[in-house]
Image (cartoon, grey):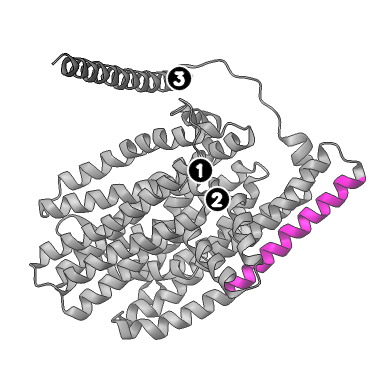
Amino acid sequence: MAGIGFELKKLFRKRNITGMLAGLIHSVFVTAGHMLLMMAFLVAIQVYLLNKGTGQFERELFSSAILYSFIFPFILTSGVNMILSRYIADSLYTGNADRILPSMYGSMAVMILFTGIPGALFYIFSPVDLWFRLAAFILYMEVGILFHITVYVSAIKKYDRITFSYIFGVMAAAVPSYFILESDMPPMMMVTGLVLSVAAGVLIIICGIVYGIRKYFSLVSNNYFDFLLYFKKYPQLYFLNTIYAVGLFVHNFVFWAYPATRDSVAQTYVFSSDYDMASFLGMLTVIPAMVVFVVRMETSFYLRYKAYLDATNGGTGEDIAVARHNLIRSVWQETAYMIEVQVIASLIMIALIQNIMPGLGISKPILDFFPFVAYGFYFTVMMNMIGTILLYFVRQRELIKVYALFFLANAVFTIVSVYLGEAFYGIGIIMAGMAGFAVVIVRLRDTMKQLDYIIFCSIVLEPEEKRTAFDRFTAGLDAKTDRVKDNNRKKIKKKDINEKNISAKTTESGHKL
């Protein structure tokens, strides 16, 4: 992710309003564009439907389709994306950039299969209208693909293309949505059309990102499934990010399961309308921290981190001591800055949302416990960002423990809160976030104290492993894919030769005539 930080920081260095504005827009879209898209449509169209007087059934059906299309693809792709992030970084570091584009195609095929099967089973047995199910399934799959390919954004530097993709995608979804909302079509058809409009916007965003990736990585190899070997090499990366993703939404699942807070629609979706809305509003408040983290924390930290590693690979003892001191100071300074900025941003956004949302039809109960959820997300995002720093020092085992604690605490405290009543809603995510944040800070402190030991002693190069059946299977997939490409090339070449022969014979016949 450091590449994103460097490119965006160039924009922020421009001392004019245009440069600062461009940097801000690119930062938001690159770091949280996919999340903003889902939230914006869930809130805006839901408010529009409410003010228009649309029936509760249709409103809940639409919001549930968006909600499920956001949460479950996010959970299913989180672990895979962490593996791919490491694979992309290693490919760039070793000079094998030709493996990146093929890995996108191969991982996309795996992801479609991995997320498509549960999604298809879910909608096949739903009694809701067939066309709505098809629209909802298409959106679900597209959002999964969008979450998946965003990991490749860190490897390209044409962020203006990414930003424009999001802008055009939002416009492509907003324009038909407006006309659908203003039409007099039947309610079920209207909801289906709205879901398809969102799907059309997401599709344009996907096409824009894929085009940008294809333009940047022109060299390709036949390593379409080589990334699968990283699941065997770094399984902890997959599990830690999956645990975090599930822990991020486990409080919602508890509200879905508890009878007093559970809602359902069309015998298909289970949700908790008030708490889910408060959760999505709470997520909006942490976007500034995500932008600050990418632009400042990773950029500044990475420079000091690289300088420290360079010193350990040939510097004197004094060089190492100075580099270590600069690295540790940078980590704590940037962490403190990030915490301070997000505190101010959270307070401002909480105040704005509580003053603006009543006029848009958001109910008072939502706004009453929304601040608690927002505070919980504050501690949660701080925990996750500090955890990202720990990964630079190969602290996967420690981070798995932190995220497991967060998951369990979120589940247990949320169960307690729903039994205590509405006055305690949101306490679960606060307690879990605080616990995870406290523990990860301790882990970061211990890591900084043992920095030299971690770099020189704890990271041991493993001996080369023997070739396993999984290795042969992965190689076989790549070989089979390559053979299919060769056969297609041969067919195309043979077709071209035949067409040229036919053209030559026709010309020759014409001359004879």
Q: Closer to us: mark 2 or mark 3? A: 2
Does the segment drawn in magenta span residue 380?
no
Disc 1 marks which residue? 216
Label 1 vs label 2: CA separation? 8 Å
Real-space CA distance between mark 3 and mark 1, rounded to the nearest whole angstrom? 26 Å
Q: Is residue 262 above or below residue 231?
A: below
Viewer-nearest residue: 314 or 21: 21
Element type at mark 1 = helix
Q: Give the number of the disc on residue 157.
A: 2
> What number is the disc on residue 475?
3
Q: In this orientation, which residue lies closer to the viewer: 173 or 237?
A: 173
Q: Report the Cα–Cα distance between label 2 and label 3.
A: 31 Å
> Does residue 330 belong to the magenta stretch?
yes
Q: How many marks?
A: 3
Residue 483 image position (x, y, % from top left)? 37, 18
Q: Which residues are magenta?
A: 318-343
